[in-house]
Image: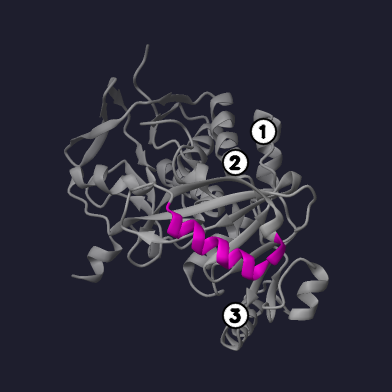
């Protein structure tokens, strides 16, 4: 058996899967290593929102990256279904970013103006218009941004769709294989050392989410990232009582198939603890009831938590290691990993191949915070 590959991807979540898939589409011999089960971390815990406009105000490099990635999902959904048979459950029914007070109304109207100047569709709805669209929503909602292009997918299905499609194109995937450190020499990477032995490649991509920092510290690179726990729960109703994703400060409601609704998510920084707490779920319940009072009549399904990778400046790291050639990094996507996975996979594949990209990747450079301090 050959242990030499064109590229080795470290991480079996949505980002690692997207990168492996894109490299395989270009004919590369690719190995993907995951230290636990595939999609077992943030990717498996995500609600699957594609909130390019709901999450960002319409200015800056991250917004440009996000809206380009969002536009890729329609074609991607078809590709994955054809290659793997997996339906990523892409739903394009828009999103309501709701206001609960006058201050939020003013802020969201300001954002609408910015996003329209950027060429995006964003409309203001009064509270009455919101309730005509979604009658189950509360009188506490005083208005909302209606974002028609923001949508959602089933996060686990997307992740497994990338991975299964990658396998169909020849990618080798190994679960329960932990990378201990990299083989480095003369300013280059040549492989990885794992609990199952050595694997070799001149291109290694680290896409380990919140766990990337520890692994990369062994190369002398100290990423300014930290883990953020997010708790969620889900309920089920006998009918589809909500059809549009509802996004508010501190809480979102994401309607899925068969009357299922995901409610999330708490934000607890700097912990890898995945315990679901009474406090966290209680806070979400109160916020959900304020948005949609009838949710109290829905049947409880389950609760869970995920650990998301955040960076000091809120931007992901996308690029090559500043010291070791061939060692690439894709991490720090925080709660936009699902949304940014298509464009991340494409960008990293371009970098590995040495191809120019039309995107300005300067804001996402791996050494940007170091350079700001010098």
Q: At 36% from the left edge and 15% from the top edge, which residue is drawn?
A: 2
Query: Percent x, y for residue 111?
Result: 59, 80
Quarter of the image where one finds residue 68: bottom right
Which part of the image, by quadrant, shows the N terminus? top left
Disc on res. 111: 3
Query: Percent x, y for residue 154?
Result: 63, 45
Residue 72 visible in the displayed image: yes
Crowding near the residue tagged with mark 3, few <14, some 14–19, many ≥20 C-alpha atoms within 10 Å: many
Secondary structure under badge 1? Answer: loop
**Magenta portion: prevailing SS class:** helix
Q: At 76% from the left edge and 74% from the top edge, which residue is drawn?
A: 130
Q: At 35% from the left edge and 36% from the top edge, which residue is drawn?
A: 203
Q: At 38% from the left edge and 60% from the top edge, which residue is drawn?
A: 268
Quarter of the image where one finds residue 289: bottom right
Which part of the image, by quadrant, shows the C terminus? bottom left
Check residue 285 for magenta coloring.
yes
What's drawn in magenta, residue-wise? 277-294
Residue placed furthest toward the top? 1
Secondary structure under badge 2? Answer: helix
Crowding near the residue tagged with mark 1, few <14, some 14–19, many ≥20 C-alpha atoms within 10 Å: some
The answer to whether 112 appears left or right of 8 in the picture is: right
State the CA–CA distance, disc 2 to disc 1: 8 Å
Label 1 belongs to which residue?
86
Earlier-in-chain disc, 2 versus 1: 1
Disc on res. 158: 2
Q: How is the image coloured?
A: one colour
Earlier-in-chain disc, 3 versus 1: 1
Query: Percent x, y for residue 328?
Result: 34, 45
Count every numbered label the image shows and give the total.
3
Quarter of the image where one finds residue 140: bottom right
State the CA–CA distance, disc 3 to disc 2: 29 Å
Crowding near the residue tagged with mark 2, few <14, some 14–19, many ≥20 C-alpha atoms within 10 Å: many
């Amino acid at each position: 058996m050959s242990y030499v590959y064109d590229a080795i991807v470290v991480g079996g979540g949505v980002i690692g899967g997207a990168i492996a898939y894109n490299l395989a589409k270009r004919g590369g011999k690719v190995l993907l290593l995951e230290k636990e089960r595939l999609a077992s971390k943030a990717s498996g815990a995500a609600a699957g929102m594609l909130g390019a406009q709901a999450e960002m105000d319409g200015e800056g490099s991250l917004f440009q990256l996000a809206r380009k990635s969002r536009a890729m999902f329609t074609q991607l959904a078809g590709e994955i279904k054809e290659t793997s048979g997996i339906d990523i459950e892409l739903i394009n029914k828009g999103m309501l970013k709701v206001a609960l007070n006058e201050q939020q109304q003013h802020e969201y109207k300001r954002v609408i103006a910015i996003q329209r100047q950027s060429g995006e569709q964003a409309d203001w709805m009064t509270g009455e218009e919101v309730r005509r669209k979604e009658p189950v929503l509360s009188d506490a909602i005083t208005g909302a941004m209606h974002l028609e292009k923001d949508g959602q997918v089933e996060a686990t299905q997307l992740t497994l769709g990338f991975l299964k499609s990658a396998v169909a194109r020849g990618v080798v995937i190994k679960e329960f294989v932990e990378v201990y450190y990299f083989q480095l020499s003369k300013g280059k990477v040549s492989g990885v050392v794992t609990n199952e032995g050595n694997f070799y490649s001149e291109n290694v991509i680290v896409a380990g989410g919140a766990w990337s920092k520890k692994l990369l510290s062994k190369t002398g690179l100290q990423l300014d990232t930290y883990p953020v726990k997010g708790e969620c729960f889900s309920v089920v109703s006998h009918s589809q009582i909500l059809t549009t994703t509802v996004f508010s400060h501190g809480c979102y409601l994401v309607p899925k198939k068969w009357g299922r609704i995901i409610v999330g998510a708490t934000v607890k920084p700097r912990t890898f603890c995945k315990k679901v707490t009474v406090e966290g779920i209680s806070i979400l319940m109160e916020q959900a009831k304020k948005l949609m009072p009838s949710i109290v009549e829905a049947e409880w399904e389950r609760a869970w938590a995920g650990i998301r990778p955040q960076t000091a400046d809120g931007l992901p790291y996308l690029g090559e290691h500043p010291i070791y050639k061939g060692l690439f990094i894709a991490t720090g996507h925080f709660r936009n990993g699902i949304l940014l996975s298509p464009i991340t996979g494409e960008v990293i594949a371009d970098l590995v191949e040495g191809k120019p990209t039309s995107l300005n990747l300067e804001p996402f450079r791996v050494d940007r915070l170091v350079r700001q301090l010098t």
